[in-house]
Image: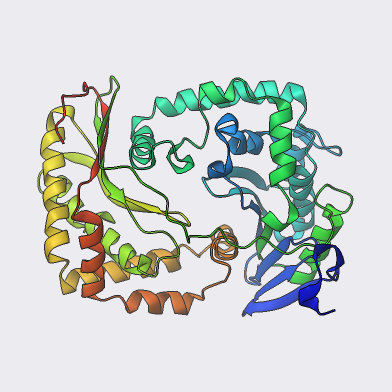
Amino acid sequence: MTDQDRGPATRPARVSTRTLQDGVKKTVLPSGLRVITEAIPTTRSASLGIWVGIGSRDETPSLHGASHFLEHLLFKGTHKRTALDISAQIEAVGGETNAFTTKEYTCYYARVLDADLPLAVDVLVDAVADSILDPADVETERGVILEEIAMHEDEPGDEVHDVFAEAIYGDHPLGRLISGTPESITPMTRDQINRFYRRRYTAPEILIAAAGNLDHQTVVRLVRKALAGTPLDTGPADPAPPRSGDKAVRVRKARDVVLHRDTEQAHIVLGGPGLGRHDQRRFAMGVLNNVLGGGMSSRLFQEIREKRGLAYSVYSYAGQYADSGLFGVYAGCAPAKAREVLDLIRVELDRVASAGITPEELVRGKGMTKGAYVLGLEDTGSRMSRLAKSELLHGDLMGVDEMLARVDAVTLDEVHAVATQLLSGPLSLAVVGPFDDDELPA
């Protein structure tokens, strides 16, 4: 029998380690859980993250918000530690720990002095692998999450992006709130959340990344020790592959959505479907995004804020998922100026779609893209995130030099082609402000 003939039950239970780049190593444990580290001897800190390839898009309608709910609950106590123990043990050494949920993954992280990395591994692995989800804690956190949802509704500058996503994706999971809604969170039971936890938080879906003054094999030993005897200490399996982008997400026809809020400002997002993260044109998309609304020298910032003083905040952005993406322009302005601002945005998008950008803008857009990427790798937390996202989302680690070369290779024609595709057709409009449904024209 060859290795290819063996099923999961007979796969050799061995540890596989290889070097990905200078200072970066990856180990796959027999359970399929991965450990990736980057040694940075010049720093005295270390950042650790436990990344789970499960997010809000993996929820059924009855479990809408379960990933975010679970993120709250995993810090509330294990068989070895209380909620106070988890926070106090990290804070006692001057460290910090937190978590966040996205539509495609969830991350639990800690940043400590290098000497305290063993403690961080033990505490964080214990919390993610062996939480007890006490019923009393479920009820407490339910109230916290409902307050969080209410607080989000009081932030129209954030809420408008959710309105925009729903306008594009409708009832697809990518169009839903990560936090869930009061209608989904209120009836959700502890048993439902626990089943989601144990069914989806499996070793093959989990990646542990660390960066800082560390030794890879020591981190692997610490992780294996912390996992021993937990529900994640399982039999042989292969790591889960990156989420596939083979089947495109169906998006809705362009539409206008106006959400009435008694606000002092109008919050506007105009845009449409973008590019998925596996699309090789994403580098041209990054350059286009910077030229349009990526900084103070961008077209939109210059036209709307600098020349006319119509808005304090105006920018463009691109959101990418495995099989889809978004591109939008945001502006916050006085309600009486909303039509004028919207017209200016449309004019600029039409101009770029039809004529592209200039050679000077291409050079500036490339520089902004490269600078933001490299300068974003100046601390252990961002280096740790780079390792995790590369493995979890792409399945490999693109070197810094390769990434810079890909940006340098972007041409004017490539940027123009992307702009034409994304900006030429009808665009969706999301507005949050003191308007009725028919008060702000498309």
Q: Position of residue 86 (x, y in %)?
A: 75, 39
Q: Position of residue 249 (x, y in %)?
A: 42, 50
Q: Position of residue 105 (x, y in %)?
A: 57, 49
In the image, is residue 208 above or below residue 343? below
Q: How is the protein colored in the picture?
A: rainbow
**Which residue corresponds to the image point at 24% horizontal and 60% vertical from the top-left?**
421
Q: Quadrant of residue 197?
A: top right
Q: Is residue 309 visible?
A: no
**Which residue corresponds to the image point at 10% horizontal and 38% vertical from the top-left?**
340
264 sits left or right of 71 in the view: left
Q: Count all numbered tags in the image, as a single digit.
A: 0
232 sits left or right of 210 in the view: right
Q: Is residue 57 visible?
A: yes
Q: Position of residue 216 (x, y in %)?
A: 74, 70
Q: Residue furthest right?
A: 229
**Which residue corresponds to the image point at 76% horizontal and 31% vertical from the top-left?**
133
